[in-house]
């Protein structure tokens, strides 16, 4: 399984856990600075914590070793002829990886295009060193980004002044940097719905914080309500800006303006984060470990097969991993492994005579020194087919370089499906 795939799954689990803590315990508090810090630190921590693994945690769920493409051995050829090779092109993890990078590319293009348009707007409209830019043609009352405030030219003087004050609060708190950060995280985790929810929550906190400070300066709440309602049908322009007239937040902003302020004791809720982090670390760490007899995934679990060839005794003393930092290197790559097997597996004559076909699934370990060991038949078909698959895999040349985890040579599991077919 791809190391990147596993890492992103771990990041997503942490993001989900942190968001649920925020949503359940913190989101209704009026401690906006604390909530803002919690969201930013949660996203950063989600990308860091997967690198931390707790030792000696037993497995909770079965792991899935590195699965090579299916090899088809065609037994219809005459004896001595070269057998055909058919490699499955639909490797699920290759497809998932391709989909992930396609989504990442699309999100990156959207982000860069939005950023470029905003920079162009600033460069085209700014006057000397002024930080306030008047504009026409955008369906928004005003927004701020990167040290600049954008105000609709059609606003009255009073409305423009109130919105300018509000947007200046965003600039004072450097909210634009938060948005850029969360947009980058969203591009990396575009498949995770919780990162979008975190983004919405962060934008809401920005507005609550700016509203609260404007009201504390003496702006009557009633006037503020009126200003918001006047802008209710306007929508934001740029995803990387703070928009005064974001319609999805106006109702919540009006509620939070009059809500009783949370006291300092509400900060004690943050202590609940510790058991959540500990639980997630234990769960994720347990998924990294293997036992010597992992369960066979349901999709390959067969009815009781004929007795398979005996497995090589485990004399190494260590336990192979399913996921490592650097996979081992076979001379010529995975294609050379497939070529070796297809050139050396001989369809047993007795099996051909009896019309026996089926897929034999072989698991083996690439040991810490690169050698092949612990060969086992996970799914057998027939004793002769099983023995032939076992024989060839067990005789496979050693890998040039072993797997690496935490900078150390380690053993890692591999699985090869060998499909014996008569056509």
Image (cartoon, rainbow, N blue to C red):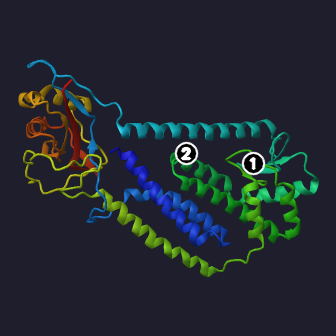
Whether tag 1 and tag 2 are in contact, CB under 8 A, the answer is: no
Mark 2 nearby-residue class (10 Å; few <14, some 14–19, many ≥20): many
Q: Quadrant of the N terminus?
A: top left
Earlier sequence position, callout 1 versus callout 2: 2
Asked where in the image residue 359 lies, by quadrant, the reply is top left
**Residue drawn at 67 percent across, 52 percent down:** 176
Residue 236: mark in rendering: 1
Q: Is residue 187 left or right of residue 2?
A: right
Q: Which percent across, then down, holds residue 321?
A: 24, 52
Label 1 residue SS: loop
Instruction: Locate residue 351 relative to residue 267 in the image: left or right.
Output: left
Determine the image quadrant of residue 356. Answer: top left
Taking the spot 28% from the left edge, 64% from the top edge, the residue there is 55
Q: Nearer the viewer, residue 111 or 190?
A: 190
Q: Is residue 263 visible?
A: yes
- Which label sits on residue 187? 2
Residue at 73 percent across and 56 percent down: it is 248
Task: Give the residue drawn at x 76%, y 54%.
Answer: 247
Distance (Cα) linking label 1 and label 2:
20 Å
Pinpoint residue 62: horizontal percent, then vertical percent. 28, 56
Relative height, residue 302 to residue 79 (above, below): below
Quarter of the C terminus within the rendering:
top left
């Amino acid at each position: 399984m791809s190391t990147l795939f596993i890492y992103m799954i771990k990041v997503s689990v942490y993001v989900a856990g942190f968001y649920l803590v925020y949503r359940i315990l913190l989101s209704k508090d009026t401690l906006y600075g604390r909530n803002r810090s919690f969201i930013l630190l949660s996203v950063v921590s989600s990308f860091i914590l997967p690198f931390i693994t707790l030792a000696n945690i037993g497995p909770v769920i079965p792991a899935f070793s590195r699965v090579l493409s299916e090899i088809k051995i065609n037994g219809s050829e005459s004896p001595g002829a070269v057998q055909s090779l058919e490699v499955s092109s639909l490797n699920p993890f290759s497809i998932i990886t391709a989909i992930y990078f396609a989504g990442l590319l699309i999100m990156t293009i959207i982000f860069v295009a939005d950023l470029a348009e905003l920079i162009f707007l600033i460069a085209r409209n700014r006057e000397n060193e002024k930080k306030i830019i008047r504009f026409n043609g955008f369906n928004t009352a005003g927004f701020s980004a990167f040290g600049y405030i954008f105000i609709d030219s059609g606003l009255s003087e009073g409305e423009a002044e109130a919105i300018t004050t509000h947007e200046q609060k965003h600039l004072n708190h450097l909210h634009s940097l938060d948005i850029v950060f969360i947009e980058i995280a969203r591009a990396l985790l575009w498949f995770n719905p919780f990162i979008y929810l975190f983004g919405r929550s962060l934008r809401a906190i920005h507005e609550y914080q700016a509203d609260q400070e404007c009201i504390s300066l003496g702006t009557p709440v009633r006037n503020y309500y009126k200003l918001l309602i006047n802008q209710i049908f306007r929508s934001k322009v740029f995803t990387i800006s703070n928009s005064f007239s974001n319609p999805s937040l106006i109702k919540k902003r009006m509620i939070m303006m009059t809500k009783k302020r949370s006291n300092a004791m509400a900060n004690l809720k943050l202590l609940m984060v510790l058991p959540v982090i500990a639980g997630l670390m234990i769960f994720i760490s347990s998924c990294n470990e293997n036992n010597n007899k992992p369960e066979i995934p349901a999709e390959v679990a067969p009815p009781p097969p004929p007795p398979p060839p005996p497995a090589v005794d485990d004399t190494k003393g260590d336990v192979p991993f399913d996921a490592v930092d650097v996979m081992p290197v076979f001379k010529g790559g995975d294609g050379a492994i497939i070529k070796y097997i297809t050139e050396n597996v001989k369809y047993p004559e007795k099996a051909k005579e009896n019309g026996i076909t089926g897929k034999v699934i072989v698991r083996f370990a690439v040991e810490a020194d690169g050698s092949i060991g612990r060969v086992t038949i996970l799914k057998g078909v027939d004793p002769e087919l099983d023995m032939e698959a076992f024989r060839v895999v067990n005789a496979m040349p050693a890998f040039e370089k072993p797997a690496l985890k935490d900078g150390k040579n380690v053993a890692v599991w591999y699985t090869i499906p060998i499909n014996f077919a008569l056509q």
